[in-house]
Image (cartoon, helix red, strand yellow):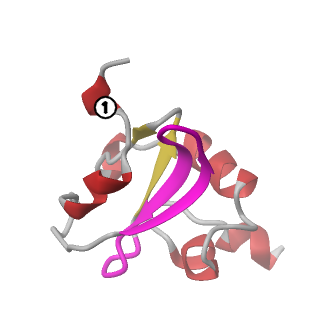
Amino acid sequence: MREGFRIKRKLMDILACPIDKYYPLELHVFEEKEEIVEGLIVCPKCLRWYPIRDEIPEMLPDELREEKDDLPFLEKWKDRIPKKILLEGKPFNLRKKAET
């Protein structure tokens, strides 16, 4: 894996939301070794969330994201993800599951 694709904490100093350009973004780290292995990047303005999987931040626009990939990530880390993102996050959230 190329160095530039790995997520480092200092990268958060320059990242902005790709949708509304909001800065700064919130970082939630779930697993960390030399780099952040798994975590979540959150835009507090539009409530979009972007997973970090295998050290790679997946900051894709809504139309390129897949519910079948994103919902299991939310479910896996639900105890460490802010409740507002679990219930209102975009493009996908666990609200329907919480209501059942």
Question: What range is drawn magenta here?
Answer: 26-47
Q: Residue furthest front?
A: 34
Amino acid, disc 1 = Phe
Q: Position of residue 59 (x, y in %)?
A: 33, 48
Q: Is residue 51 left or right of residue 100?
A: left
Name the residue: 37% across, 34% down: 6
Q: Is residue 67 left or right of residue 5?
A: right
Whether 27 is among the magenta residues is: yes
Name the residue: 30% across, 20% down: 2
**In which image quadrant can residue 19 be found?**
bottom left
Q: Is residue 88 above or below residue 50?
A: below
49 or 97, which lies in front? 49
Q: Is residue 96 above or below residue 69?
A: below
Per the image, the residue denoted by label 1 is 5
Q: Is residue 47 left or right of residue 92?
A: left
Q: Is residue 90 above or below residue 52?
A: below
Q: Position of residue 4 (x, y in %)?
A: 25, 31
Describe the element under mark 1 as helix, strand or loop.
Answer: helix
Q: Position of residue 73 (x, y in %)?
A: 64, 48
On-image quarter of the C terminus: bottom right
Name the residue: 70% across, 57% down: 77
Q: Main secondary structure of the magenta part?
A: strand
**In which image quadrant can residue 26 be found?**
bottom left
Whether 16 is among the magenta residues is: no
On-image quarter of the N terminus: top left
Q: Position of residue 27 (x, y in %)?
A: 44, 65
